Amino acid sequence: MKARYLTAATLAAVLAVAGCSSKKSSTPPAASASASGSSSAAVATSSSAAPASSSAATGGDTASGTLTVWLQNDAQTGWPKEVAAAQTAFNAKFPNVKVDVQYQTWADHLTKLDAALAASPPDVVELGNTETTKYMANGALADITADKGKFDNSATWLKGLADSVTYGGKTFGVPYYAGARGVIYSTAAFTKAGITAPPTTLDELKADGDKLKAVIPSTQSALYWPGKEWYGAMSFVYGYGGDIASNTGGKWTADLEQPAAIAGLTELKTLVNDLSKAPADIDESKQDSAMAQGQAAMIYGNGWEEGAVNDPKTGNPALKIDAFPMPGKDASAPLPTFLGGSDLMIPAASKNLAWAEEWINDFTGQAGMTALVNDAKPIPNTTSLLSLLGTSPFAAAAKTSWFVPTAPNWADVESQNVLQNMLSSILSGKSTIEAATKAADTQINTILNGS
């Protein structure tokens, strides 16, 4: 069985803010934010997202001041050495600039940020990759498009993260790190079914699923697939050449009823109907428990879910498991995976843009990211460093990824469960794929183009 990549707690926190069904970190921050606020605090807006000036432009030994950095407490508990190394590298260039790292928690960091943007914002802030769009759209973040080439590996950033720092064709941040999904399976079940190697195509996956059905209990799913598992479902949509929605001339158009998306959803429905006994009206939040309790030979889950399945207290440590990327239509590439993760952004009101850019590159550039991956094993922000994770199936899956539409109102699509309800209707047989996607597209168009 392959080594675990990322602790359960670490990747759970990352994927929680990316809209995934995982546990949010509850570790208290080491230092409180410089500003506090209520949930009613509005996101600060700006007529221009042009970079703020900084004395660091001429920098060096004469530069002095304080650079304020907000990181989530995953960094505090998971990779403090890498945070310290970034500070050392930065201070080698700017010895008189103090780097004030303040650790936040996922539960309240946006409330604090909204208040700080209207008063005294940090110079660098970590955001979950599905949290960035409204801040980019509202002009709250610095446009660093002109400086993108200064950041190491910017040409090879993971697509699912690069998309999350891009709005209107401009770049507003730097990808930090990610988590991906793969098929987690029982090695004992595979052995019993005579499966000697993981499938590399969807046809092979179906065939292996049928082999599993012949040897597992009748109550167990060969592939446990909850009906509302929209992250996995959209991997089929993107894998077959479709997308959720596209933007032309400032207008969003939902695309789920287009032929490519229909083809992907049709493939998914065939697979689920054949291999899954999971209810069509639940999401994936408890699928790790279902596997631990003997309800699944396979699940499509996040890397951290391996640890959850084997958790000594809440899972089944005796269950031997492994993983492989979700296969695609052919063996050339797996289906694209949704990447949950984090980005580092610079508020437009920061007066220390150049310092902020330097610190971010010291932390997430070639040297910093290499150290982070070697030490803590997250998925790096660039395809060029995925090899550091060896044979990790989750790293392999991250090579091809997708991201949600970067529309200011996208969060409302998620909160209104548009995709979840569409999929539940399809997989339960209550609606045809054509009818369900047409209804979902109507809702998505209304939401994304609303004021």
Image (cartoon, rainbow, N blue to C red):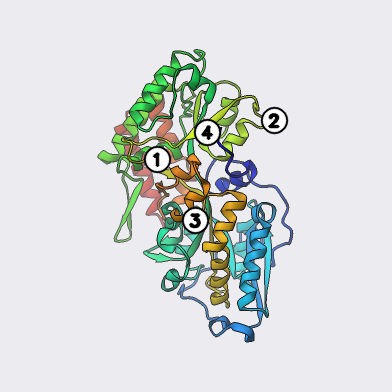
Secondary structure found at label 4:
loop
Q: What is the spatial separation of the Cα atoms under label 1 and label 3, in whole angstroms? A: 22 Å
Q: Earlier in the sequence, mark 1 or mark 3?
A: 1
Provide the residue designation for mark 2. Answer: 312
In this rendering, would 256 be left or right of 411? Answer: left
Q: How far separated are the C-alphas under marks 1 and 2?
A: 32 Å
Q: Could you tell me how far apart the alpha carbons at marks 4 and 2 are, in whole angstroms?
A: 21 Å
How far, Cα to Cα, is label 3 from label 4? 26 Å
Taking the image as drawn, is residue 74 in sight?
yes
Image quadrant in which you'd find residue 259:
top left
Identified by mark 3, the residue type is: Asn
Q: Amino acid at mark 4?
A: Glu
How many numbered discs, if any? 4
Label 1: few (<14), some (14–19) or many (≥20) C-alpha neighbours in 10 Å: many
Q: Is residue 334 above or below residue 296?
A: below
Left or right side of 149 for 189? right
**Residue underneath mark 3:** 381
Q: Secondary structure at mark 1?
A: helix
> Looking at the image, which is closer to me, 38 or 94?
94
Element type at mark 3: loop
At label 2, counting other C-alpha atoms closer than 10 Å, the crowd grade (few under 14, some 14-19, many 20 or more) is few
Of 155 and 366, nearer the camera is: 366
Give the residue displayed 51% in from the left and 50% down from the top: 388
Quadrant of the rendered image containing residue 273:
top left
Where in the figure is residue 118, as x and y percent of width and height? 60, 70
Label 1 sits on what residue type?
Met
| Number of the label disc, if any, that sits on residue 234 | 1
Q: Which residue is mark 4?
A: 284
Indicate the position of residue 210 as horizontal and vertical percent values: 40, 18
